[in-house]
Image (spheres, rainbow, N blue to C red):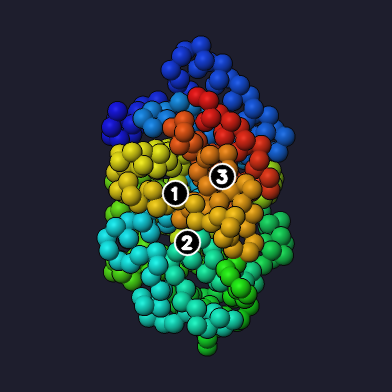
Amino acid sequence: MNINSILTYFNIFLCLAIFVNPVDAQNNAKQITKEFKQVMIRDSLPGMAVVMVSKNRLIYKQCFGYADMSANRPYALQTTQEIGSVSKMILAVSLMKAIELGYFTLETDINTILPFKVINPFEPTHAITIRELATHTSGIIDKQSIYMNTYRFNFELRPYDTAFLKPMNAFGYSQSLRDSSISKFLFNYLVQGGNYFSPDNFVYNKGGRTFVYSNIATTLIAYLIEIKSGVSYKKFTSIHIFRPLHMNHSAWFLSELNLNKQAQLYFNSEVKIPLYDLLTYPDGGLKTNAIDLSKFLIDMMNGLSGKSAILKPDSFRVMFTPQFSNLDKPVGINLTKRNKGILWNLYTNGTIGHDGDDPGISSFIVFNPSTGLGGLFLCNKYIDDKGSLTDIITKAISKF
């Protein structure tokens, strides 16, 4: 089955579970659905979509709860919502595409591309590489008093509960930044003399590299792509990912979406959160739905066998190669549960994926190369511990 057949399949059969063996189909679907329903009730989740796929066909998809509880609007496979840091998997593919296009390599010194110089004040002679940005070892960190203000809540698009304003302010979402572009924000944050520059924006790497998860560092990758490609990151992803995969309902900004399909986001089962965009949108700002994200997942699963519509097999091999070893690992990472590829998480159970968290959302995407199966979920509420949900999917894709 080619990719166009798969896409047609998605559009025809919505919210059904399909397996090779009809008896197994019924039993597996019922058990998985039962487990997800239990978590939905236990954690008071408003709505969720779950999809599992093989390399060439759908094996399970189901929707639970509501996209908008007060309007009694069910959560559907076509419901769009933010996916948080799962967006970084789009960035991983964009980075590998940029390398295929000859823009740079993983070892390129970022200061040979940037129109300004990024220097870690604690190690001024160290050349930060693109690989370090992509493995969270660049020395750039997210200063929370600044980074939290890259979220831009839109209080006009929909009703929301003012009860959210208190925790919003407590968490630091004061929307005080006025930068109009990624480039201006990165200059102000990373360059001495910038409005938000501080040595606290960097970590001191004493005797080696330090692993510190950094949204700002990953956004810098997108800016490097913009510089070399001559187009915005938004347009680059549209040309090289969304269009080839027919991800027609995926966008970086609310203004590009049909708000009737956009999920209401929840702080808890009663408090509605305003919709928002991100200034540093490449690190976590993608809005998409379960069907579109499944198309991306299928392509990732087919990549190593040369059947991707967007990248060459060598790019997948690099992207999914462990970057650290126990003999040579940075400070701050524990390899007992996961290693890092190029932005992707390489879990020690043999799966590859990433999760996403942001105000009002949780998400997860994963696949098992040994079984050729993958899965994902999208939820319109932040879940502090996604372990129960990720375990259901990880277990399912190990045996179907």
- Which residue position holds label 3? 347
Q: Residue at x 50, y 56 (%)?
A: 323
Q: Residue at x 58, y 70 (%)?
A: 208
Residue 147 falls left or right of residue 89 = right
Q: Gap between marks 1 and 3, in whole Å?
A: 11 Å
- Counting from the top left corner in percent of width and height, residue 209 is at 57, 68
Element on which disc 2 rests = helix
- Counting from the top left corner in percent of width and height, residue 127 is at 46, 77
Relative to 128, residue 222 above or below: above
Amino acid residing under circle 3: Tyr
Amino acid residing under circle 2: Ala
Q: Residue at x 63, y 64 (%)?
A: 331
Query: Label 2 crowding class (10 Å Cα cut-off): few <14, some 14-19, many 20+?
Result: many
- Which residue position holds label 2? 134
Q: Gap between marks 2 and 3, in whole Å?
A: 17 Å
Relative to 113, residue 54 above or below: above
Amino acid residing under circle 1: Phe
Relative to 189, residue 283 above or below: above
Q: Does any portion of residue 257 appear in the rendered image?
A: no
Q: Identify the mark nearer the N-term, 1 or 3.
A: 1
- Counting from the top left corner in percent of width and height, residue 309 is at 29, 44
143 and 77: which one is in front?
143
